[in-house]
Image: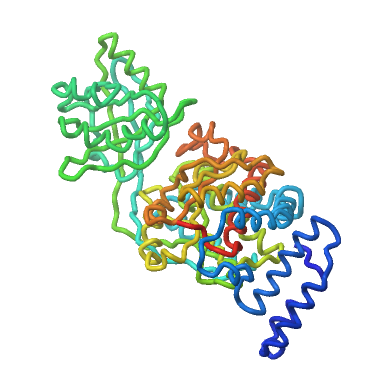
Amino acid sequence: MRRSTCCHGLQIYCTNSVMMDSIPSRVIVILMIYSINFSSPSYAATLKFERFKVIEDAFRISPSRWSHGNKERPLEDWRREIMSYRGIADQIIERSVRGPAANQSYNRLATFVDKFGSRIVGSQNLENSIDYLLEKLKEDGLENVHGEEAMVPHWVRGDESAEMLSPRRKKLALLGLGYSVGTPDSGIQAEVIVVRSWDDLEQHAKQVNGKIVVFNQEWISYGVSVDYRSNGASRAAVHGAVATLIRSVTPLSVYSPHTGMQDYADGVNKIPTACITVEDAEMMDRMQQRGERIVVELKMAAQNLPPVKSRNTIAEVVGSTYPDEVVLFGGHLDSWDVGQGAMDDGGGAFISWQALSLISQLGLRPKRTMRMIMWTGEEMGGIGAEAYYQAHKDDVSKFDMVMESDIGTFHPYGIQFTGNEKATEIMESVVDLLRPINASKLIKGADGTDIAMWMSQGVPGSSLYNDESTYFYYHHTNGDTMTVQDPEKMNLCAAVWAVVAFTVADMEDMLPR
């Protein structure tokens, strides 16, 4: 942001402890500030912002808090304050979309994923990538750059293969699922039974023993269909299945298996489990309908090794007035061990870095601390997020808002938000600042594994609302590469993230809850 020469000079004056020790000196500063005239409507908004920041430096308290004290603020007062940020929001947008920071998040992400590739939790490669990022965040001039330790699982895929032996020989593309056990070294060779639903499984329960169960469930939505990937192994094992092969959870396949996490139930035999392509699941379903006997040989060398240390990656712009109050935003840095993890969730992590970087580049300093976090261990069950929450939950009242981007960084529409009625109305005014880039929509219901614990304790939460229509085409596949990413859309997403996070961090009061 271009600061007025007069206000910049006053800030230097205010931060001199000798000059500001006396009340008369502070009064002089206030009179000097308010002697400055507004030269234009747009400049007025920026100058008003500057005036308030100088007063905060002098008195270490927001001027608006003097008049409101502890009384509940009227909604119209919130809206007037938010409107004063329009000039600042426009500057953030301009720098991100058309200015010197355009394409910066894309280029940073491309360099990162081309250098490190996939980053499965527990791997040395993930830790090497964290070391790299900690250095880059420091080079970017951000504050309090550090890693916070978290113990994480260490699952290794190993070699894996599947081949249909009957009614004809055919190699089957597959990806083992997280936490899966391996097969014996000699593999498993067994007859296949195909089911299409949980009801179908129960109706054919007596035919399951000793067989490989293939789930050919219908794609309804990710939230519905992923249940088969998560729980298919245990539910089939109850009936004596020796392994499960799950139709990949995707609305579109180009013979692409999709991996992901599965969860063994307590007290149930752990059997090998993997995802296969939509095409092969449907082929075996058709064969079964024709009465053909299907036999598959499965080999998986998956291992669950002892937990290891990883780190959540953190950087800040420290608040000027209430540094212990925090707006937390981020994405997860780990990925599956396929593709590059560029979309899931390199994009979310790097627009979060970019949001913080934009604020730093513009010389802005919000009242509250803006804290960027790249969580570790999300793909294996939000492990890093749990560790971070446990370490900081005693300060839950100091977290103003939590934000997560983990559903792609495609064309942004606005944000998804979870909060009470008044907070929702306030945030509708905040996202209206994004009208110049047509990203001013707010829909209810923030989404994100890594912020769920905070929202369950009443902290307002936001997630990026963007065009996710193609997200599950590439999700957890070898196709998750930089080819999926678009620099212009990442510019827009970073602008959304920066404007929302900064405005909330700088408003005179924390969001109501």
Please identify the residue farthest to the right as the structure is shown. 39
Image coloring type:
rainbow
Q: Residue at 38% of width from left, 32% of height from top?
A: 174
Is residue 32 visible to the viewer in this orientation of the structure? yes
Residue 121's place in the image compared with 202, above or below, is below
Looking at the rendered structure, the number of numbered marks drawn on it comes to: 0
Percent across and percent down for residue 157 are: 36, 44
Q: Residue at 35% of width from left, 57% of height from top?
A: 152
Question: Does residue 230 appear left or right of residue 328 in this picture?
Answer: left
> Within the image, what quadrant is residue 367 found in?
bottom right
Question: Does residue 372 appear left or right of residue 281 in this picture?
Answer: right
Percent across and percent down for residue 411 are: 62, 38
Q: Residue at 20% of width from left, 26% of height from top?
A: 211
Q: Residue at 67% of width from left, 79% of height from top?
A: 58
Quadrant showing the C terminus: bottom left
Question: Does residue 178 appear left or right of residue 83 in this picture?
Answer: left
Is residue 345 visible to the viewer in this orientation of the structure? no
Please identify the residue farthest to the left as the structure is shown. 206
Percent across and percent down for residue 125 are: 47, 55
> Within the image, what quadrant is residue 385 found in?
bottom left
Residue 37's place in the image compared with 254, above or below, is below
Quadrant showing the N terminus: bottom right
Percent across and percent down for residue 265 are: 21, 42
Residue 319's place in the image compared with 483, above or below, is below
